[in-house]
Amino acid sequence: MLILGIESSCDDAAASIVETSSPGIVTVRSSTVANQDDIHRAYGGIVPELASRNHVITILPVIERALKSAGCTLGDVEGIAVTRGPGLVGSLLVGLMCAKGLAQATGKPMIGVNHIEGHILAPLIEHRVPFPFLALVVSGGHTALFAVEDFGGYRRLGRTRDDAAGEAFDKVAKLMGLGYPGGKIIDDLSKEGNCRRIRFPRAHVRGAPMDFSFSGIKTSVATMLHSEARPIAPQADVAASFQEAVVDMLVKPTLAAARDLGVDTIALTGGVAANSRLREKLAATAADDGRRVVAPSLKFCTDNAVMIALAGSYRLLRGERDDLAIDAEANLAL
Ligand code: KG4
Ligand code: ZN
């Protein structure tokens, strides 16, 4: 079955063509993304109105490129999987309305996909991951742990009580005047820094060992940067020390959840899963505990349409289709 995936929940418009004959196993025929970093950089963060207006311009060309590089036409596609939430409602609407229009015009089945389910299943794009496994979804909008029992069988074990980890990266990069988006900039800069130079506090949520909190670390960095008695530390040391604190605050609840669940495999996924120190430290800590970490390659950590096609594929293979009346939902629950 050839599936067209469409993703536009935030600031990236993406399309993909995947081929599948059994649930969770896909061959990627193409994956295209129209990135808007250059548009939002001037504002130091995503401006929702600009994101949706630009999706209107790019969504069809992105789909056309995906079809062309897969060497197929819309007529060859047998199902359409599209993100319907959670995300920015204006952005979501562009992809969803486009999918509905294509489904209506061609008579192909359409499935609305939860963006978080896409991230949870993204490690399956390149790896065989047997159920059950633990998924750490860590992105600009979400930080949560899920027990993944089967396709469609997800149980949330923990979540952030305030900011998402990616939001902390982006806000701290902004505070430090490093630019946008901050995650990759801090990751790269940290490679030249000493992560033990500043000991930022590691927050934990009392009585909830599988929950996270990242608002305090952001305040700690701001306080240090604005303090008159601040240590004169190179930017790279501040970045590396901040990153190490965030990584520690992600690793500890994840290991606690893996032990609690008794699973061998931890799937690390979402935009922040691209972080080199997180990948390294979580893998090493898990290995010491007799567990393994699987993470998508960097292009499938950040938002992409292959993960959406994969998450829609098991339902399309069963012959399911959604009604064309489904709505975009900014707070869609998993
Ligand atoms: O999954 P994603 O593309 O969009 C959301 O669904 O949020 O994640 C984007 C987030 C941003 O906060 C970005 O700064 C962060 O992922 N990110 C990183 C890295 N690459 C992207 N954070 C830390 N280290 C990275 N290398
Ligand atoms: Zn995402």
Image: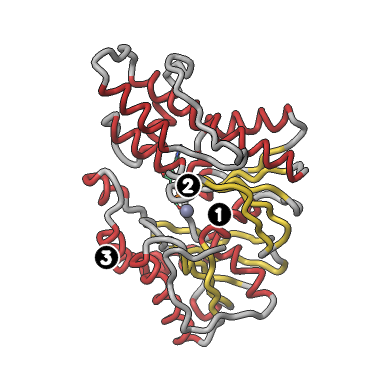
Q: Secondary structure at mark 2?
A: loop
Q: Residue at x 35, y 33 (%)?
A: 172
> In screen coordinates, is 123 left or right of 31?
right
Q: Residue at x 43, y 42 (%)?
A: 166
Type of amino acid at the residue the image marks with label 2: Ser
What label sits on residue 53 in the rendered view?
A: 3
What label sits on residue 139 in the rendered view?
A: 2
Q: From the Cβ of disc 1, is ligand 2 less than 8 Å away?
A: yes
Q: Sequence-wise, which precedes: disc 1 or disc 2?
A: 1
Classify the position of ligand 1 by quadrant: top left, top right, bottom left or bottom right: top left
Q: Sequence-wise, which precedes: disc 3 or disc 1?
A: 3
- What whole-number distance in Å separates the C-alpha atoms at marks 2 and 3? 23 Å
What label sits on residue 303 in the rendered view?
A: none
Q: Is residue 127 above or below residue 23?
A: above
Q: Is residue 320 above or below residue 44?
A: below
**Front-lying residue, 316 or 240:** 240
Q: Is residue 191 above or below residue 148?
A: above
Question: How many other residues sit within 10 Å of disc 1, few (<14), some (14-19) or many (≥20)?
Answer: many
| Quarter location, residue 19 | bottom right
> In screen coordinates, is 242 left or right of 288?
left
Which quarter of the figure is the N terminus placed in? Answer: bottom right
> In screen coordinates, is 188 left or right of 282?
left
Q: From the Cβ of disc 2, is ligand 1 less than 8 Å away?
A: yes
State if disc 1 and disc 3 touch (CB < 8 Å). Answer: no
Type of amino acid at the residue the image marks with label 1: His
- What whole-number distance in Å separates the C-alpha atoms at marks 3 and 1? 25 Å
The percent position of residue 208, horizontal first and vertical second, equals 60, 41
Which quarter of the figure is the C terminus placed in? Answer: bottom right
**Front-lying residue, 42 or 18:** 42
What label sits on residue 119 in the rendered view?
A: 1
Q: Secondary structure at mark 1?
A: helix
